[in-house]
Amino acid sequence: MKSDAEVNQAANSSRAAAAQDPALRELATLLQLGRRAREADNIEVLGFVAVNESRQLFQYRQAALGRVSAVGQWLPGAVMAVSGLPQPDPQAPYVQWLAQVFAYLAKQDIPEPGAAVRALNARELPELLARDWAAWLPEYALLLPLHGPDRHCLGNLLLAREQPWDAHEMLLAAELAHAYGHALARFAGSDSWQHKLRLWALPAKSRWKIALAALAVCLLPVRLSVLAPAEVVPLEPFPVRAPLDGVVDNFHVRPSQQVKAGDPLFDLDTTVLRSRLGVARKAYDVASEEYRQAAQLALNDEKSKLDMTLKKGSLEQKAVELDYSKELLARVQIKAPRDGVAVFADVNDWQGRALSVGERVLTLADPAKVELAVSLPVAEAFDFQPDAAVTLYPNGALFASYDGTLSSAAYRAEPTPDGVLAYRLKVRFDRGQALPRLGLMGTAKVRGGWAPLIYIVLRRPLAAARQWLGW
């Protein structure tokens, strides 16, 4: 039996010999990298080892690892790791270009493991990708496809540098790719098509049970429903409109303020109207004086009676204009014609704004009389009953809901403020529950009839297919 000192001395001698022999050093590095890959706790650690620690075996400037999608080579996965970066940014131009390169390589015919390691250059890529090669990678690259135990390609490791790759390095790269491929298979799961085929290759009895269970689930009756944005609006709103052209001078109410009949709501600017009233009053005074003079002359001169008649008509016209100016000035303060809540967005939206006759400024609503307005997108519409059940789920309220019944539906779709073509539905709330406040917004669930689950799942895809195929 050798002593511990002799064993340690022998081990040190072996390490010294390995350090002096390049072949032994390469073999030790290869074994060490394989062990580091197998001991990786997650796929991020494995990616870091592949793109950064492989430099212990090869001299290269850049490295990138791309993982093939579990769905297949036609849907390549994202870039897993890039040398020199702790985490690749999917939005970075370099990473996006690498993703396109890996996508193209995943579509190519991949040789058997061991013979797949090959040199890669810009001439082997499409023109669109080859054009940007010089901007992102050195001239010479080495491609290492990573295969799992079932010979299914799980990803690609790309090493790039300024010097060509020799045959000896390719042999080492093939062994390293084999170790990385087996380590990557731990995190790839059982997503290969071979594994899925084996899962399907069950006994016939089991397959029939699964098929019958799937058919039962597909035929399970489910109630049709659709979600749409909704808002609580007044049931019988009274619009307050501008009685004349003018500019809003002052607002006396705030949004959602309770007002009573006769309370002032807002004032229009009186500058123009006061000027018009002054002009009308001056014109009336002039016409009155002219009529007085004509009346005096008519007492002694018969010819002046005709002029007096004309002056009287002008005086009456000026009096009408003066009364109209006074009436307009009296209408600059708009008052509430009924009790209710002032419904409008913000005072600053109207302060100083020019109004036209008949333009709606705000709405007076009764908080005890509200309904639900639902904007049902055209793509979500289906045949529902006139009295369909509707439930409102308010935004920000986790457990609150309000039940209602559909009362009317627009026959024609119109664009919403968001630019979505939708039908406008009106819903009355059921009695026996607290009414929501005006302006409350949320999501409405409109319920229809019953249908099989398979119809619910395939309704929209089939509708889109019919529109596209024309059948």
Image (cartoon, rainbow, N blue to C red):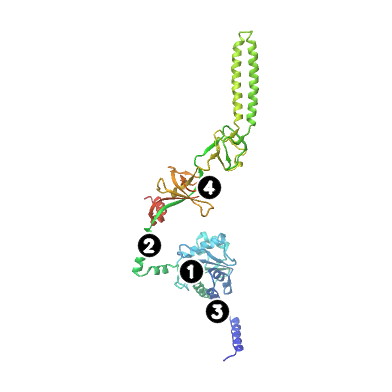
Of the residues under marks 4 and 2, which one precedes in the sequence?
2
Amino acid type assigned to the residue bearing label 3 in the image: Leu
The location of residue 226, given as percent across then percent down, is 44, 51
Q: CA distance from mark 4 to mark 1?
A: 48 Å
Q: Are marks 4 and 2 in contact (CB under 8 Å)?
A: no
Q: Is residue 423 visible?
A: no
The location of residue 67, given as percent across then percent down, is 50, 66
Figure check: 64 above or below 377: below
Q: Are marks 2 and 3 in contact (CB under 8 Å)?
A: no
The location of residue 163, given as percent across then percent down, is 57, 70
Q: CA distance from mark 2 to mark 3?
A: 54 Å
For mark 2, give the secondary structure: helix
Amino acid type assigned to the residue bearing label 4 in the image: Leu
Q: Is residue 96 visible?
A: yes
Quadrant location of residue 221? bottom left
Residue located beneath label 4 in the image: 440
Of the residues under marks 1 and 3, which one precedes in the sequence?
3
Quadrant location of residue 310? top right
Disc 4 versus disc 1: nearer the observer: 4
Q: Residue at x 64, y 16 (%)?
A: 290
Of the residues under marks 4 and 3, which one precedes in the sequence?
3
Residue located beneath label 1 in the image: 188
Amino acid type assigned to the residue bearing label 1 in the image: Ala
Amino acid type assigned to the residue bearing label 2 in the image: Ala
Say left or right for 99 vs 196. right
Disc 2 versus disc 1: nearer the observer: 2
Number of residue marks: 4
Label 2: how many residues lie within 10 Å, few (<14), some (14-19) or many (20+)? few
Residue located beneath label 2 in the image: 214
